[in-house]
Amino acid sequence: MHRSELNAYYQRVRRLSENICRPLALEDCVPQPIADISPPKWHLGHTSWFYEAVFLDERIPGYTFFNPHYKFVLNSYYDSFGARIERPLRGTLSRPTVKEIFTYRAYIDEQMTQLIEDVEEAGWADFAHLLVLALNHEQQHQELLVTDLKYILACNPEKPAYRQDLAIGKSAKPIELSDRFVDFAGGLQQIGWQGTGFAYDNEGPPHQAYTAPYLLHNRLVSNGEYLEFIRDGAYRDFRHWLEDGWKAINDEGWQAPLYWIENEGEYCEFTLGGLRPLDLQAPVTHISYYEAEAFAQWAGKRLPTEIEWEMAAQQVGADPADGCFFDDDRLHPGPPGAAQGGLHQLMGDVWEWTGSAYLPYPGYRRIAGPLGEYNGKFMINQMVLRGGSCATSRDHIRPTYRNFFKTDKRWQFTGIRLAEDLS
Amino acid sequence: MHRSELNAYYQRVRRLSENICRPLALEDCVPQPIADISPPKWHLGHTSWFYEAVFLDERIPGYTFFNPHYKFVLNSYYDSFGARIERPLRGTLSRPTVKEIFTYRAYIDEQMTQLIEDVEEAGWADFAHLLVLALNHEQQHQELLVTDLKYILACNPEKPAYRQDLAIGKSAKPIELSDRFVDFAGGLQQIGWQGTGFAYDNEGPPHQAYTAPYLLHNRLVSNGEYLEFIRDGAYRDFRHWLEDGWKAINDEGWQAPLYWIENEGEYCEFTLGGLRPLDLQAPVTHISYYEAEAFAQWAGKRLPTEIEWEMAAQQVGADPADGCFFDDDRLHPGPPGAAQGGLHQLMGDVWEWTGSAYLPYPGYRRIAGPLGEYNGKFMINQMVLRGGSCATSRDHIRPTYRNFFKTDKRWQFTGIRLAEDLS
Amino acid sequence: MHRSELNAYYQRVRRLSENICRPLALEDCVPQPIADISPPKWHLGHTSWFYEAVFLDERIPGYTFFNPHYKFVLNSYYDSFGARIERPLRGTLSRPTVKEIFTYRAYIDEQMTQLIEDVEEAGWADFAHLLVLALNHEQQHQELLVTDLKYILACNPEKPAYRQDLAIGKSAKPIELSDRFVDFAGGLQQIGWQGTGFAYDNEGPPHQAYTAPYLLHNRLVSNGEYLEFIRDGAYRDFRHWLEDGWKAINDEGWQAPLYWIENEGEYCEFTLGGLRPLDLQAPVTHISYYEAEAFAQWAGKRLPTEIEWEMAAQQVGADPADGCFFDDDRLHPGPPGAAQGGLHQLMGDVWEWTGSAYLPYPGYRRIAGPLGEYNGKFMINQMVLRGGSCATSRDHIRPTYRNFFKTDKRWQFTGIRLAEDLS
Amino acid sequence: MHRSELNAYYQRVRRLSENICRPLALEDCVPQPIADISPPKWHLGHTSWFYEAVFLDERIPGYTFFNPHYKFVLNSYYDSFGARIERPLRGTLSRPTVKEIFTYRAYIDEQMTQLIEDVEEAGWADFAHLLVLALNHEQQHQELLVTDLKYILACNPEKPAYRQDLAIGKSAKPIELSDRFVDFAGGLQQIGWQGTGFAYDNEGPPHQAYTAPYLLHNRLVSNGEYLEFIRDGAYRDFRHWLEDGWKAINDEGWQAPLYWIENEGEYCEFTLGGLRPLDLQAPVTHISYYEAEAFAQWAGKRLPTEIEWEMAAQQVGADPADGCFFDDDRLHPGPPGAAQGGLHQLMGDVWEWTGSAYLPYPGYRRIAGPLGEYNGKFMINQMVLRGGSCATSRDHIRPTYRNFFKTDKRWQFTGIRLAEDLS
């Protein structure tokens, strides 16, 4: 990537983070209602600190940190970068203020812009690769910004909309679906990233993987179908659930997906555009792995493995261009549009829970140094999700992309695609 | 009290709450770092809701609440007024925004001003009494505003000052103290409120109380003396402590008063004017009952009972005019000035922990209705404090005033005056 | 006390502790279902360790502890005697076995018997006083043994009786009660222990105390009356409760006294003689301070202060001989018998919650040394109870005796006597 | 299996459970120091209730449960069989006593013996299969009995031995090991159970699985090697650890495997034969998945997948006959003996943590009815272990056997075998 191109990419990503926060009240930028959620201003700060720790401090001799306290309050989980505030305390910090963080961002941008110009040619490729990673890091936080601010807004009994002008519900009438399962041959194939562009270390190395023939549902599970599951006693019948899931729904009192609100048997749903009547044709979202797995059990199906998902994506030529992403300014999953290779919405709309644990691919080794903490240390007790969501940037996603969350998390745009053995 | 007088009082109290928040960043108005602390914007809202629930809704036929959600989010602990947000969740609310709360305050002020005009003569006395109580309620929240915002600011590693222009440290050279214990005869005397002005129900009924002769220290325990206690091993020697206190200091890792920061044996203290070197002559403050009691044990003395305190206050003619209060714009206890009846700083500077449990006076009955929840239901597991602090409004305090906190609380301006038996 | 007399007293107390455990299965001696409860075998061991730590190790030159681990596992809360197992872990210990503890007890008895003989005349008085204290200590644990084993047995869904042959329910027909309040003059009188026999340090020093004239109910509140309170919505109406109490009943889900079991509106009660239909005339027991206070509120009365209780006891000449105690082998409160000075059951049956906080009497100083930890360090956040219970030994109680428990505790034989102002 | 044969198997298994408990004091049979551990008497009861619920109640018309309370207190996790005591409360139950449980066992044995005789020929095969499963269930609890009683004994500061006569340390001098990695071809092979004898449902269905060529260490990681890891700073260096693991070791304060005790740099180990100096040549055991994974990272290797493990087991003809199991009466892992196919101790001694998550095999479906709760509902958030341990019965294990535990569990006999990619 050329300097000017990279610089443009840098500027574009940086502006987007800020633009995401503009519709918010300053007060929305501060709370941390649960430990999973970070205050929006923290995201804006952390994504700036990242460049300071990874680039400026490493590459500018005698560099002085903009503010020594920021190292402590804006470090997320990098033990390599020293002591840091405990995660659940992020919401106790009233300072730096949003304005101070914007000042900090401007300072970092100035320094980084200069650095992009100054890096010597010999080190350019490495630098560029690392910077692209850092920009992808910021893109991940953009998705978290969207999901975290949704959670924060939803805590308010008033349920304020993030924006009134989102494209939710403006989608054309959904295509008449032939409701069917598409078969895939499986077999021994290569999966994992092997291109020349950027991918995370956890997407590789590319390797042979095997799976028996299988079927994938041509579309995502809809709100209407999930509602049927609820009305069939979903949350009251232990037989559908994994033990940990049954405990979770009872401990937490879950009776529906995260943002559904029931009133005398009718449901509405909190979206970033405010409360809306439940769209029965749209994909169900904001569900835990437990709920995805239980739905599949109830339906007599199962979740696909990540190998199955990726082989299918290869076969149908899955392309981010075909899905609904952050760029489409809807910020909510919608009813299916046109299919690719028989599959609707394989990319975008909702992250699809797979039945695969997030573990290293064969041959994977953690990178040495701080960035070794980026992906590798989380490879336990999480499940893989694939395909990106309506809150993911289109240029951030790939068919090999492995997202991962703990099994009880519901605040991401998560959903379900069913699979079946081909017997 | 005349209408115009009461109206002026109303306006004065209302403006003060707002003025307290003006030096804050908007972001400082949102967090709730621990359950004891409320976000400043919550205080501003709650003190407005109080008039709506107690006056407007009761006295204006067909009154509609300004915003139905505010009843839920701004009710503190009044079961009489229905369901409410759980206390530890106040900091999860980003809305109403500070601006919305100011709009709400303006609306309430308009309504209340009208109501003060409209109340019929026949009901005026009752109305006026109730409104004075409500204004005292807001004054209590003003003190909490000060102590809560101090806590919030202190959570920030930067330790930002609330205001740079406070009168801390500008006090004249302290009077040369003859360090002595003043004797009081005790005996059977009447205590409790019996005047014609306003007092809380918990200050009465007036009744005979008895105490043996006793001595009170002529001044408050200083930072210098408390430091001596620390250096003598205070926090490491179980023998000084009540069992619950020893548990608290070990569970919480306390090694000094709340806002002291130690660096290589030297201490500084976070004040509302920012970090300052510890003023050894100023009264120690921000200590729990456990620490007050342990200090007294160590010093071979004891805390006074509230009866002893109040009888002494009667005898010396304790007068709010003589102490340092919120109105003095210092917001931090300072070295002693002139004595009254031999006692320095009996009123103001710091709340003095007494050795008396907060229990009803003989003959006390809870008021019927919502305001019965104001004081009576808290009469358990708390200790009484007397005298007011540098964060109390001068016109809010009286020698009969009974403040109360749980034994492990440290975020108020609390301090120590020693007592002794006259043997 | 003569040596032979003290020795006889020693042997009597020691045998009683063992006899209390004899009806138990070995398995009953092990569990600690909640932190408040200690395993019966721990009580048997701890009361033996106490002599070892306080007498044998202090007075026998070169004394070697019977088993060095016992110092760790059998110390209760004496920081003076070094590190010890955390209280909630007592039930994790399967060893020493009951048999090993009996062996230990026999060893301690042998040593102590010898010591009683060997102490030089010059030190006899001090020794005897200390030993009487130690025997009173063991007597306190005998009461705890009874209440703890009751709790342990009640945890079993089978609700096994401790003994089938208890005198519960065998009491004669209760005296026809004239239900009345007896008036007392109050005034300035001396309270606190001042005799020549044994009393705990917290019962003194004797001092003048004042109270206004008052009335005491001539009997205890009965199960029937408490049931009326329940049926009037006691546990659902916040207005009766202290704030902490309302929280406790909701957090814990309390709907009746501790051992009441409701079945379709009918109640039975777990007693040490097994499950029994609720005896409506017997005193209500196993209630927290919150429940006692709420009942009094509901009844339009209040709890007596400990001063009122003790002055009344003086006036009526309260005598342990008149009450129902452990020695009566009933182990459950029964209906009232004959009155003393107009008051039924002032001594015995149930500990009566007073409205007084457990705080030091004027002039009280903690004893130096380990026994300073016996009473003084608990003087906070507890309420005083008076009169002893059906699980207290008759020779252990006095009218000046101050028992104390935290406000949420229910596993002791606690009850209610109402008081009223004489207006 | 013939009736007489099955009956003999039944009797053998039943006697063994009882014999495991015989060396215990009655008191050892009661505590539940942590929720993972069950009291030994509970295991004895639960394994009896299982026959009552699954056989007697299903097959004997009008069958009455031996004791209706036992259904409540002895059900482990079968929602199909109704309400039950919460797991962490098992240790609060003093009843049924050990003796009562033995009586219950005798009753169940009588009924089951009769039932084995009475079952009609037509239903024999199904019955026999189910009974073999039930006996395997009891065998699993036998292993838990051993590991749970070890934990209970270790809670006692005296560290009492379970038995003095165990064969620990009596093993012959270990074979001189050529320390090497054995290579395996991998490829596409069938794994999973497909024989005619008994296997759990989670071991099937048999299916094709693929893995690249790989290496397995010819032996287990030894205490000596693990000690080297510790001395290299293992527990203080975040770089070795998964994020969840780093949190666990810090939260729990782990500094060595579960039963190691350090004293001035020297380690001893609590075994069922009591405290012993650490045997540096024996396999390390009682480690969590986190520790196994961190050790492998530190050593520059990795854990094998369960596919790799099972393919290797097939290739070397792994046979329970070759390992050290419960039957060998050592109850502690020992140094390696002879190798099978180049691999020492593949079966027995310690369960080997694999790098595979416990998830359903392709084509797996939960069984309908209560036994569907046996394995399937636990297939989340656990890792697979293979090979059995010194506490597993030899006739209970197979190379296809999939054991599973959460990643922080350490009380089983768990250990490490390293793997490596063949590059």
Image: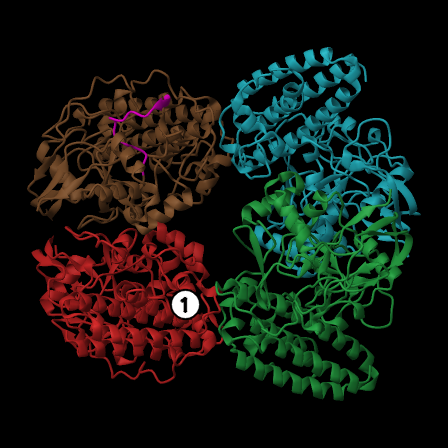
Chain colours: A green, B red, C brown, D cyan
**Residue at x-position 17% and y-position 35%:** C399
Q: Is residue D272 visible?
A: yes
Query: Which range is magenta?
Result: C274-287
Quadrant position of residue B127: bottom left
- Neighbourhood count class around disc 1 (C-alpha, 10 Å): few under 14, some 14–19, many 20 upward: few
Dividing the image into 4 quarters, which one contains the C terminus of chain B?
Answer: bottom left
User: Dot 1 corresponds to which residue?
Assistant: B67
Q: From this view, report whether residue C374 is shown above or below residue A64.
A: above
Q: From this view, report whether residue D222 is shown above or below residue B10.
A: above
Assess whether residue C230 is covered by the magenta stretch: no
Comparing D196 with C90, the one in front is D196
Q: Is residue B95 left or right of residue A177?
A: left
Comparing A321 with C87, the one in front is A321
Q: From this view, report whether residue A302 is shown above or below residue A100.
A: above
Q: Main secondary structure of the magenta part?
A: loop
**Residue at x-position 22% and y-position 68%:** B131
Q: Is residue C227 left or right of residue A4?
A: left
Across and down, in percent, residue A210 comes to 88, 51
The amino acid beneath tag 1 is Asn
Helix or strand or loop: what does disc 1 sit on?
A: loop
Comparing A237 with B64, the one in front is B64
Across and down, in percent, residue C219 comes to 17, 31
Q: Is residue D78 visible?
A: no
